[in-house]
Amino acid sequence: MLEYKIYGMDCADEVAVVKSALLPYIKDETLLQFNLLKGKFTIHNAEQFSQDKIEKLLKSTSYRFIIWSEYENKKDQTESFWQKHQRLILTILSGLTLLIGYIIHAQSHGALEALVGDESVAHAQPLASVIFYIIALIVGGWYIYPKAVLALKRIRPDINLLMTIAVIGAIALGQWLEAAMIVFLFSIATLLESWSVGRARKAIQALLEIAPDTANVYCAHHKDIDVKPVEEVNVGNTIIIKPGERVPLDGVVTQGKSFINQAPITGESLPVAKDINDKVFAGSLNEDGLLYVKVTKTATDSTLANIIRQVEMAQSKKAKSEMWVESFAKYYTPLMMLFALLVMLIPPLLLNGSWYTWIYEALVILVIACPCALVISTPVSIVSGLSAAASNGILVKGGNFLELAAKVKAIAFDKTGTITKGKPKVQKLINISHEYSDDALVQLASALEKGNNHPLANAIFQMMDERKLSTKYHAENILAVKGKAIQGTIDQKLFWIGSHQYFHEKAQVDKELKPFHDEILALEKTGHSLLILGNSDHILGLFAVADELREDIPQVMQKLYQQDINTVLLTGDNKGAALFIADKAGIKNVYAELLPDDKVQKLKSLKSQYDKVAMVGDGINDAPALATADLSFAMGKAGSDVAIETADIALMSDDLSKLPWLIKHAKRVKAIIQQNISFALALKAVFIVLALLELASIWMAIGADMGASLLVVFNSLRLLKK
């Protein structure tokens, strides 16, 4: 893998230039990855290519680049004022020389005449003003002309070529002022583009910088504290976090109690109480107590680092609207050049029009045709939308997923651990056997469930702890019957624990449960799940397990209904328990007693009914269903790497109230993108009509185009506000 820092790579136009230079050699576009937030370019499987050849091709783009590792090493070095502000300085110089030239020009002919594009004024400009205009053209176009030459060589017209042709045309007509103004205002537009992407970069950088650079590492042997850079702290080390300090690394509390503000990670507005064995995350703030924390992840593997990495990678997963704009701009630019050529030729040749007038109006069309506002609007909206979601504790893995969230018509929810708290408890044990005590049944069930991390299994383990029971039985040849039961051999005899449905499939004698029939029905109707324990001969007992509904679920469902989102409950639990929970939650569509494969089929059916369907689960169980849904949400559990890696969107706290917020936010992103595109295209259409009516001038077109770029960028950046 080869990684480069490409300086000035701020939009799709620069990406297209790099792609077109390298693809004839590399051929496979999927090997190229661009990170606009960092200006980073990655080539995968680079060992099959010549690095010298790649760098030679990169040099042909005229972009300045450096190997990423060298850039990282240089980052801490202070850049010179010129290196930091080169583009800004050149733009200001261009503006100043343009202003001086205009003042000299205006004193000679009057301010208004200097701007209206009058042919007589154009040919009577003072030499001094022309000299200043030329300086403005050279300084302002420092980044434009080389790119235009490359675009011409590649026979792929771009914005830079469009502007250069307009400048040459204006000079040919003697309109030095307007030529200089084209360059100056276009350089402002590119500066604005660089600034807007930089703003989004800073939003991510601010997230990165909340984690301290150093950690207080505690040495138990010498009972002293050593301050080390976080990169040098290893997993297993103990660190001390004082009140008011930020947590430098992910870990588990081994001593102390405190309240931690982990809003940057989970988006939770209130501090969370932390005690021994609780997880803490890098970047969160320790508010009041002294904590001793055992480090569980290095600085590069922390939850915060993972979030930042995913947000940056999200840039490569473009939204359809973003891809549409890029594709549109690809064909739009040469078509507008052709249209401008026709406007220049047809009126003089066929309608006896003035060559000067129609060449001038063709230049107006070239200027207003510049797709700056169009091209910049969508990526800035997407980056702002992703950054805002991340700051609210929602990790969206790409612009395409953010766009999908705005189109979702139905959301399917898993039950256990999603709409419930995920900590079911055994509410009742019904002992049917004559040979085993209640404690023995718990120990048998625990032996079968050993190693299982399902919430229902955890309920059995919790019962073991509550009764203070030790391990008595050991199960061998354990076999999981997918979604139904677990069976194994204990003391050379087959035992199993499973659902009510599995019991019927085993065709056990129903009469064993007949005395408890009414009680079982009552338990199932009140939201209890039944785990039946048996062996090859008899039913031994029943564990009635119940989970609590999350407190805010009814309000969440109500908000989703208000947004015209249909909600569905998909669960492997019995029908009575599912209906009971769904009724309390306010979910109208319920499908119970589903195996993992059944959930997949049900999701396919829902997709045909509602078109776009999302699924919310824990990111580990129900993986096939999550993969089948158009959009998958995982309960991030504030640090579940599996959830962060597998889902399209991870809710970093177990807070489903983020879900309606995200749907609303995604719709807002979509609306802003549509506003920007519509506005940019409408403005261009208006100016094309004005040009055809001979009512538009170049300076008006430039002003309108720059104004459009400013408006769409500021409109997009509104998404960063909470």
Image (cartoon, grey):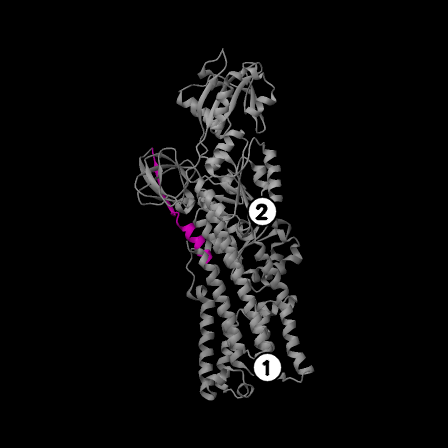
Amino acid at the residue labelled 2: Lys
Disc sitting over residue 665 in the figure: none
Q: Secondary structure at mark 2?
A: loop
Please give the count of numbered marks on the rendered protein. Answer: 2
Crowding near the residue tagged with mark 2, few <14, some 14–19, many ≥20 C-alpha atoms within 10 Å? some
Amino acid at the residue labelled 1: Ala
Q: Secondary structure at mark 1?
A: helix
In the image, is residue 34 above or below residue 435?
below
As rendered, which of 31 and 422 lies closer to the eye? 422
Location of residue 471 (image quadrant): top left
Q: Position of residue 91 (x, y in %)?
A: 47, 71
Whether pointer 2 and pointer 1 mark residues with C-beta atoms closer than 8 Å, the reply is no
Disc sitting over residue 172 in the figure: 1
**Residue appearing at x 44%, y 76% in the figure:** 96
Q: Position of residue 367 (x, y in %)?
A: 56, 73
Magenta segment boundaries in residue numbering: 199-220
236 in magenta? no
